[in-house]
Amino acid sequence: MHFEGNLPAKLPSAGTTIFATMSALAREHNAINLAQGFPDFACSPRLIDLVEKAMRDGHNQYAPMPGIMALREQVAILAEQRYSAVYNPDTEVTIVPGATLGLYACISAVVKEDDEVIIVEPAYDSYIPAVEMNGGKAVFHKLRPPNYQIDWQEMRKLINYRTRMIIINTPHNPTGTILSAADMLKLEKLVEDTDILILSDEVYEHILFDGIEHQSVARFPKLARRSFIVGSFGKTYHTTGWKTGYVLAPENLTAALRKVYQYMAFAANTPIQHALAAYMQEGNAWEEVSPMYQKKRDLFRQMLKGGTFKLLPCQGTYFQLLAYDKLSQDGDVELARRWTIEAGIASVPVSVFYHDKTDHKVLRFCFAKTEDTLEKAARALLAIQS
């Protein structure tokens, strides 16, 4: 049974995301899945206990639309502790069912027909559809390997009277690069005396390496007052399947966000919110995240030394890029599929993060895995000849 009439579908060219595609291919061929960005190890048992306690304590009905106050307060405390930024938990912190929905809600709240949104590519794949679904036009600033740094002079040329928003992502998925304090000051200068808003995707804010300090837009008052900041408890506490995130924004932007968000999901999962609030009250578990992932990054990189591919810099996130141009001239999508099927190792081709599929012969591998998984993956990669 199917609809016989004309179907004016939105996003007609969109298909299944590359993450779902590569994960399905990995399952089909029993390959090691370093494609989709999720840990293959357990979260804290204490968190599980706290979720169970919240359920048994009766926290099983709708939470308040903006989130339970205890969790909003913990988010505000952490923002002040880390970034010296003061956010009112009542009017400037919103808990959402996953960072992806948070990003969509922020864009939907302020982007209108014919507004332009500058997107830094390679980019997380939800940005462009969210802009287009709201009638906006995506405008692109392309980063290039090996360092994937923003050229602020080039970005300035993209700005005009229709520019409504700039979307940034730091630490950056898929490249693992970060924006420095100097970058933030350049962004601040770029948007001064304009009405341009910033959407800052900071879901990997607690995963940085080599002593690098996260430069949230919250640290920069002139930026913070025009910015939505989206964060993720799932990335921080190894619970991506819980789909719980948050949005920080000044009161006027938060009010606009909540007007839209209330009709998207109304509220995030109640017992999980209670569990996260209690867990954060008990200590700063986020402090353990960067050292833990740095050990995994260093182990993975060390095991891959001697391969015929090039390891690109990784300053944050849990993704490592490999440039394979000395090994093969095949397209990255083709090669990622072939390596999954023939070599038993699944990755994500970086070209899919560009709107025009720019191919630099680079693949992304997720190292949020156990040591055993990483060792098996490294052996599979080193065995590849072409």
Image (cartoon, helix red, strand yellow):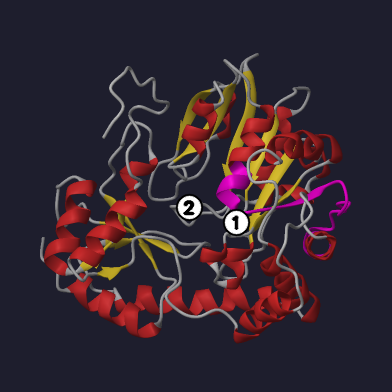
Amino acid type at image mark 2: Asn
Does any portion of residue 326 appear in the rendered image?
no
Element marked by disc 2: loop
Nearer to me, 286 or 265: 265
Residue at position x 85%, y 40% in the image? 251
Horizontal and vertical percent position of residue 10: 42, 26
Quadrant placement of the N terminus = top left
Residue at position x 46%, y 79% in the image? 41
The quadrant in which residue 347 appears is bottom left
Q: CA distance from mark 2 to mark 1?
A: 9 Å
**Magenta-highlighted residues:** 77-103
Horizontal and vertical percent position of residue 137: 51, 22
Residue at position x 67%, y 73% in the image? 286
Horizontal and vertical percent position of residue 318: 47, 65
Query: Which residue lies under the disc numbered 2?
Result: 173
Nearer to me, 384 or 325: 384
Chain-order first, disc 2 or disc 1: 2
Q: In the picture provided, is 7 more to the left or to the right than 54?
A: left
Horizontal and vertical percent position of residue 174: 43, 52
Element marked by disc 1: loop
Q: Which mark is residue 203?
A: 1
User: Residue 380 colored magenta?
Assistant: no
The quadrant in which residue 81 appears is bottom right
Q: Are marks 2 and 1 in contact (CB under 8 Å)?
A: yes
Amino acid type at image mark 1: Val
Q: Which mark is residue 94?
A: none
Quadrant placement of the C terminus = bottom left
Does residue 304 sit above or below 21 in this rendering?
A: below
Does any portion of residue 368 appear in the rendered image?
yes
